Image (tube, helix red, strand yellow):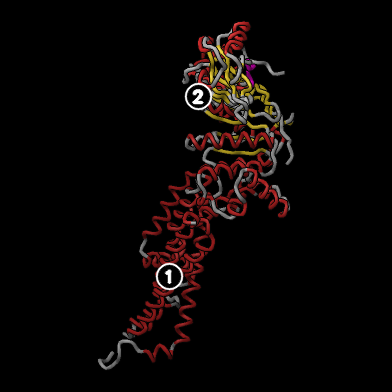
Amino acid sequence: MTSEEPFIRWDWIVANLDDIGERTWEHIVMTVIAVAVGFLLSFTLSLLIVRWRRLYAPVIGASGLLYSIPSLGLFALLIPLTGVTLLTAEIALVSYTLLILVRNIVAGFDGVPREVLEAARGMGYGPWQLLWRVQLPLALPTIVAGLRIATVTTVGLVAVTALIGQSNLGSLIIQRGIRASFPTAILVGAFGSVLLGVVADLGFLGLQRLLTPWARARSG
Amino acid sequence: MSSSAAVVTLEHVSKRYGPPGSPEAVSDLSLEIPAGEICVLVGPSGCGKTTTMKMINRLIEPTSGRIAIDGEDVMALPAVELRRRIGYVIQQVGLFPHLTVAENVAVVPSLLRWPEARVRDRVEELLHLVRLEPATYRDRYPAALSGGERQRVGVARALAADPPLMLMDEPFGAVDPILRDRLQNELLRLQAVVRKTIVFVTHDVDEAIKMADRIAILGRGGILAQYDRPDAILAAPASEFVEHFVGADRGLKRLSLGRVRDLPLAQPITARTGESRADLRGRLEAAGAHYALLLDGDDRPIGWIGKRDLSRDGDVDADDATPGSPLLQPESTLRDALSTMLGSSVQLGVVVDEGERMIGVISVDAISDVIRAPAERPS
């Protein structure tokens, strides 16, 4: 880097728009895979916990343990097993979502008022109707809150997977930026990642408002 | 609206929550609840009244014994189907917060897969029935309703599929006394229209007396202490426990069951202005009476005239009469009538119709006779 060179090279950004777009897309795909798989796993685990309460402590304990392993350490542990692959990256990303999601989904189900459940049973809801038509809709705000935290966290962690050769906005930061001492790429990667996080968060917020009009009825 | 109602029969029903040998929550309970009546299960906490009610829709399954609705064993149907045929109202109402008022009311018809148009019509009909204007309330969420409105939606929801039987678990237990009284009156008015069989659980004796066609008083351990009409229980408690439970003021409570119109009215000697005092005195002496009731031209009572007021010559006028006799309406409860009479100077109540015309009189003695009388046995 020479002193005459501007801090941000706008011309580089313009010239590399396609490339930046592709890294962004890869970033989104990795995030979606991690959150979707994490959600399916967590939802299943949560249903089991709601049914068999004794499972709560071991499941939360195990996902808490996973959560506490530094991401680089987890990659290092997984590479001998699954290699430098997308699978390695996703296993790590998914494990980080579990603690947040399981906690929120279970809290959501626990938050359904007892009298609502009793009324539903008394009126002849079967167990599955109770789950889909009563418990799930009422747990939704808490579940979506969990998804928001998990997604924003994952967006940040996806960038780290560039260290094990994954291509995304993180590769702009690491390969094109740090290794080449090129601040523009670092800024583009970091800013892009933050922007994705914010957009995802707002997206979920909008989705929640759309799905739970009743939660705002108090003012009406 | 159909007026179907079911007979509910409990035969030797027992429930034990613990292992064999542990105490029973409900013990060898047999009851027959006639169709179209409100049967109130009442008793101290731990008497098994809620357990008994929940065994009818199988939220709790009996340990032994048989429960039948219109002769059909409740165990013969899958529990979920059975419950869809039974209305259910609980104390905290339990409306679904994520559904609108209309959707809440439509819950059971939807579970029964009624066609949409029929569900919509039914919702309108029910909202009218519980006096919630559909246009105003249909699309509101429960969070935007007052406590009384929620309770009404709860009742409409329980009635939605026109069940022949409704179970109500302390439905008015969580509302303030003024609202409770209003909701009780509304339920009685509604019941006069729909004529369902209603099993109603409460721990409040006064509520039981007010609501019940029949009261089942349960003692600790779910033993049936007495099962009879409210008047009969108040007149002749079957045991010391029942006597204690209904309270020392059971005589007065009995009076709240009776109305002024139920008593034979006495006809007093009446007088009108313009009659000569001597004539009136003669009539009183002939009848062996001491007082006459002075009426105006429209038969409205003015006051009482005693024999001593008639010693002068001339005609009776309004100044001869002593006002102060309480006016009673035929639909007043005897309890209210007694209270009014004790609070006035003349302890003889004048019963008047809606035009305030005198139709008869009743005495404090006539009312206290009611307290002492044995219960009437309706055929």
Quadrant location of the C terminus of chain B in the rendered image:
top right
Q: Residue at x 40, y 88 (%)?
A: A13
The residue marked by circle 1 belongs to what chain?
A
Residue B115 pos. (x, y %): 73, 53
Name the residue carrying label 2: B44
Main secondary structure found in the magenta portion:
loop
Which quadrant would residue B194 be assigned to in this image?
Answer: top right
Q: Secondary structure at mark 1?
A: helix
Residue B228 seen by the camera: no
Along the line of sight, the residue nearer the viewer: B353 or A112: B353
Q: Residue at x 47, y 49 (%)?
A: A111
Residue B303 pos. (x, y %): 53, 20
Q: Is residue B262 magenta?
A: yes
Q: Residue at x 67, y 32 (%)?
A: B197
Along the line of sight, the residue nearer the viewer: B50 or B209: B209
Name the residue carrying label 1: A155
**Numbered range of the magenta stretch:** B261-266
